[in-house]
Image (cartoon, helix red, strand yellow):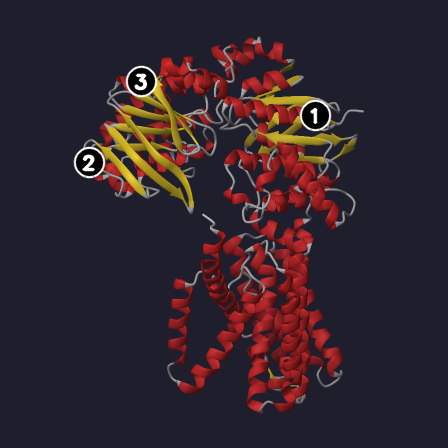
């Protein structure tokens, strides 16, 4: 579904990604694990067109996308649920969700899509009119996910969904992500909560200093000595 | 003598009760955890303690003296320092200068510039940022910026340090590093109150934990008591609290 | 901003400064009258721009009150010019600006962003109309006369104020107070929690910058000799320093000086050569400068310098 080959990206003048290659298949959850500053967010930004890579190829559903603008990438079916939620805080939950369906491909069907999102995230139905900024962290994460789903994506890039959330809410968030996979959506997941992430992911990549260090099925990664020491603290 | 105490501290924003009749007391040398779901009032409580704004009612005392009439910079000079949930480092200023600012202005006496720069360098070493001391703060990674905020707060020589979610986004190994840092801070004689969602840190570092929910204190106790409290599990921890990573 | 100053730099720069200062001081002795008058104009704008940058640069609060403080100085001259000698009038004008800024600052420095800008702009109009009303209804005068003063006297006074404002700016920038002001500009809340008395620092710096503007106003009044509120409070004097500072480059002390000098000189040249079109040409130059030189003239030179030396350092 998504395939990245030899990507080199810069953050200003500093090289953040070195020859990164990875792929995400249909209906699978792929985790990206790495320390702060390792390049995870730069990688997501390169996929979504916010950062233009210096060299390398990104292919999505057989189309080359590394040179496309962000809105074109959304039209093709990639959705980005950013770190820290980044909701339109002054707007209502409903307005936030509708904004998710802004691209041409899905705009006319938005009422139907909205209904699907409410089925998946029942909490939001009751809070439609509420101003997004007044919701709790967990609820905001739900709105962010809902907004990401409104563009009917085939691939969701989810950046640190558990960050800053209470443990009890984190469980719900991960349940949500499992549900998305069962609907046929592919997920590329960045998380610091490595243990819970590897539990739900099919495969994972480990990135360090902008380079992919390891890859494998999540069971293998969980058994890997280096991962256990460096990321699971065991 | 009790370092910090609050009696029936309440804060209203318009009609919204952010914090309702919360009592607390902190002894010197403690490490206290402040936990609760988002929107529970934790950061508001920090804002009240650090005099960002005064309480609507209730009293807060630092070393026996009321603080509600003080401005933040005055409270800082009396020994209360903090970090911010949304990191507020001075972006276009170097890491060293960020910390030097605290050394210059955060204490009640006048500090000569040589001494201030020495202290600042020392603190950057202490938090592990010596190799980026001339880097503008905006070019640092998020976790480095959080460490920088800690160094800047320490430069003001606080008796009480308020840490607001400094471990957000850290890998388990980075969390351990941050935990060591907090232990070193405690060993230097600084009392710490920390807001965190990362249970490993809270359970292992804190002698006492206060739990807020919808602005009200719903529980207070040792980590063991809190981890086994049904109320807290229902509202905040969920079932996986024991499977702490 | 950290600057690496090599040792030769430390010797060469002060020598150049002393030479330039000596040249400026000696100018009235050999330069033609026209040049001296032009220099006076340039000094005026440099002083106002550097003063403006002293406060608005680090804090990011765009003040459009410069005309009010300058005008306060002008009006001080108008009121007392016949009664008090010049060496008293100039500091008195500065004091008028200073006190006015203290009052205004205490009221408005809580306002954020756009509100502050609008309020400071409104202040100029307020003072203008208030004094008009006062003049017409209370004192029954229509304009006042200020005794003229020789060109040299004006020139040397302006030179003195210029040295004072640039010297103060330099000292402040290098000191902990300059650092504090820059940090206030970044995050006021964090600065307050780090022990800085934010309100006090903002007001004092604001008032200090107004002092120099007022002093300049007091001496410039003697050039115009006839003063009424419209002449004293000219809104253009509020807008031009902003443009000049941006044009020259706000980040560096030299920026406002260069910006104001080029600007004023350019205006002179354009007025004499294209008296009908100069505003248009000026506007176009401004647009180009702001579009292509976002860091101002100083930024341009810094970038060139970096490109020339960057290769040697091999910085990524």
**Which element is circle 1 on?**
helix
Q: Nearer the viewer, residue A164 or A121?
A: A164
Query: In the image, are marks 2 and 1 on the same chain?
Result: no
Residue C34 on image: x %, y %? 55, 89
Query: Disc 1 and disc 3: Cα gap in Å?
Result: 44 Å
Q: Chain of mark 2?
A: A
Q: Is residue B138 above or below residue C247?
A: above
Q: Chain of mark 1?
A: B
User: Does label 2 or label 3 sit earlier along the sequence?
Assistant: 2
- Determine contact: label 2, label 1, CB under 8 Å: no
Residue B181 on image: x %, y %? 63, 27
**Which element is circle 2 on?**
strand
Query: Which residue, given by chain and number where applicable, does mark 2 sit on?
Result: A63
Q: Is residue C92 left or right of residue B231?
A: right
Q: Nearer the viewer, residue C21 or A187?
A: C21
Q: Nearer the viewer, residue C225 or C197?
A: C197
Query: Which residue, given by chain and number where applicable, does mark 3 sit on?
Result: A179
| Residue B53 visible | no
Q: Pointer 3: residues within 10 angstroms few (<14), some, or many (20+)? A: few
Query: In the image, are marks 1 and 3 on the same chain?
Result: no
- Determine contact: label 2, label 3, CB under 8 Å: no
Q: Pointer 2: residues within 10 angstroms few (<14), some, or many (20+)? A: few
**Residue at the extreme left of the image, as rendered:** A62
Q: Chain of mark 3?
A: A
Residue at 18% from the left image edge and 32% from the top image edge: A62
Query: Which residue, given by chain and number where applicable, does mark 1 sit on?
Result: B186
Query: Disc 2 and disc 1: Cα gap in Å?
Result: 55 Å
Residue at 66% from the left image edge and 17% from the top image edge: B208
Query: Disc 2 and disc 3: Cα gap in Å?
Result: 27 Å
In the rendered view of the protein, which quadrant contains the N terminus of chain A? Answer: top left
Q: Nearer the viewer, residue C161 or B152?
A: B152
């Amino acid at each position: 579904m998504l395939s990245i080959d030899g990507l080199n990206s810069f953050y200003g003048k500093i090289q953040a990604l070195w020859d990164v290659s990875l792929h995400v298949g249909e209906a699978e959850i792929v985790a990206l694990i790495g320390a702060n500053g390792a390049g995870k967010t730069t990688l997501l930004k390169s996929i979504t067109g916010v950062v233009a890579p210096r060299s390398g190829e990104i292919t999505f559903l057989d189309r080359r996308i590394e040179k496309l603008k962000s809105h074109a990438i959304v039209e093709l079916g990639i959705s980005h649920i950013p770190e820290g939620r980044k909701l339109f805080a002054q707007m209502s939950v409903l307005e936030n969700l509708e904004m998710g369906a802004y691209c041409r491909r899905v705009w006319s069907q938005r009422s139907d899509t909205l209904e699907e999102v409410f089925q998946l995230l029942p909490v939001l139905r009751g809070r439609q009119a509420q101003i997004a900024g007044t919701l709790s962290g967990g609820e905001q994460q739900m709105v962010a996910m809902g907004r990401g789903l409104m563009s009917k994506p085939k691939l969701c890039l989810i950046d640190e969904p558990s960050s800053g959330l209470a443990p009890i809410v984190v469980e719900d968030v991960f349940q949500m992500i499992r549900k998305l996979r069962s609907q046929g959506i592919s997920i590329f997941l960045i998380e610091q909560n490595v243990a819970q992430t590897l539990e739900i992911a099919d495969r994972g990549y480990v990135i360090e200093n902008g380079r992919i260090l390891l890859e494998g099925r999540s069971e293998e990664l969980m058994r890997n000595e280096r991962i256990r020491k460096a990321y699971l603290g065991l | 003598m009790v370092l910090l105490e609050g009696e029936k501290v309440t804060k209203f924003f318009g009609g919204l009760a952010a914090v309702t009749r919360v009592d607390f007391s902190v002894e010197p040398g403690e490490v206290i955890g402040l936990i609760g779901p988002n929107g529970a009032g934790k950061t508001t409580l920090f804002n009240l303690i650090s005099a960002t704004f005064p309480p609507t009612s209730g009293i807060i005392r630092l070393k026996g003296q009321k603080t509600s009439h003080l401005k933040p910079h005055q409270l800082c000079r009396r020994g209360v320092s903090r970090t911010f949930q949304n990191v507020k480092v001075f972006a276009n200023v170097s890491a060293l200068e960020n910390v030097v600012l605290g050394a210059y202005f955060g204490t009640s006496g006048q500090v000569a510039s040589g001494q201030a720069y020495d202290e600042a360098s020392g603190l950057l070493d202490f938090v592990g940022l010596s190799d980026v001391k001339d880097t503008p703060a905006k070019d640092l990674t998020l976790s480095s910026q959080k460490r920088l905020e800690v160094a800047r707060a320490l430069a003001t020589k606080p008796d009480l340090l308020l840490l607001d979610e400094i471990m957000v986004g850290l890998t388990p190994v980075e969390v351990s590093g941050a935990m060591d840092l907090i232990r070193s801070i405690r060993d230097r004689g600084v009392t710490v109150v920390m807001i965190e969602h990362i249970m490993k840190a809270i359970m292992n570092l804190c002698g006492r934990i206060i739990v807020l929910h919808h602005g009200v204190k719903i529980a207070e106790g040792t980590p063991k008591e809190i981890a086994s409290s049904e109320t807290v599990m229902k509202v905040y921890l969920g079932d996986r609290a024991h499977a702490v990573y | 901003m950290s600057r690496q100053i090599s040792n030769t730099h430390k010797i060469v720069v002060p020598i150049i400064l002393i030479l330039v200062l000596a040249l400026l001081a000696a100018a009235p002795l050999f330069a033609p009258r026209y040049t001296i008058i032009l220099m006076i104009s340039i000094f005026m704008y440099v002083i106002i721009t550097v003063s403006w940058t002293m406060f608005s640069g680090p804090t990011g609060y765009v003040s459009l009150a410069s005309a009010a403080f300058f005008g306060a100085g002008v009006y001080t001259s108008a009121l007392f010019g016949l009664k008090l000698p010049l060496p008293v009038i100039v500091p008195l004008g500065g004091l008028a600006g200073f006190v006015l800024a203290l009052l205004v600052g205490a009221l408005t420095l809580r306002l954020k962003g756009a509100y502050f800008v609008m309020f400071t702009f409104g202040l100029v109009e307020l003072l203008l109309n208030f004094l008009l009303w006062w003049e017409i209804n209370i004192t029954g005068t229509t304009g006042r006369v200020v005794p003229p003063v020789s060109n040299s006297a004006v020139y040397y006074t302006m030179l003195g104020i210029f040295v004072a404002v640039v010297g103060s700016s330099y000292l402040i920038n290098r000191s902990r107070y300059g650092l504090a002001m820059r940090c206030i500009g970044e995050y006021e809340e964090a600065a307050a929690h780090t022990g800085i008395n934010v309100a006090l620092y903002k007001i004092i710096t604001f008032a200090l910058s107004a002092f120099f503007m007022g002093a300049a106003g007091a001496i410039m009044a003697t050039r115009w000799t006839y003063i009424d509120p419209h002449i004293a409070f000219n809104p253009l004097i509020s807008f031009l320093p902003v443009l000049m500072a941006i044009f020259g480059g706000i980040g560096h002390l030299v920026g406002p000086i260069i910006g104001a000098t080029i600007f004023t000189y350019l205006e002179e040249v354009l007025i004499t050569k294209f008296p009908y079109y100069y505003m248009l040409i000026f506007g176009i130059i401004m647009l180009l400068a702001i579009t292509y030189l976002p860091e101002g003239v100083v930024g341009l030179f810094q970038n060139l310098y970096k490109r020339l030396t960057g290769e040697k350092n091999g910085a990524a």
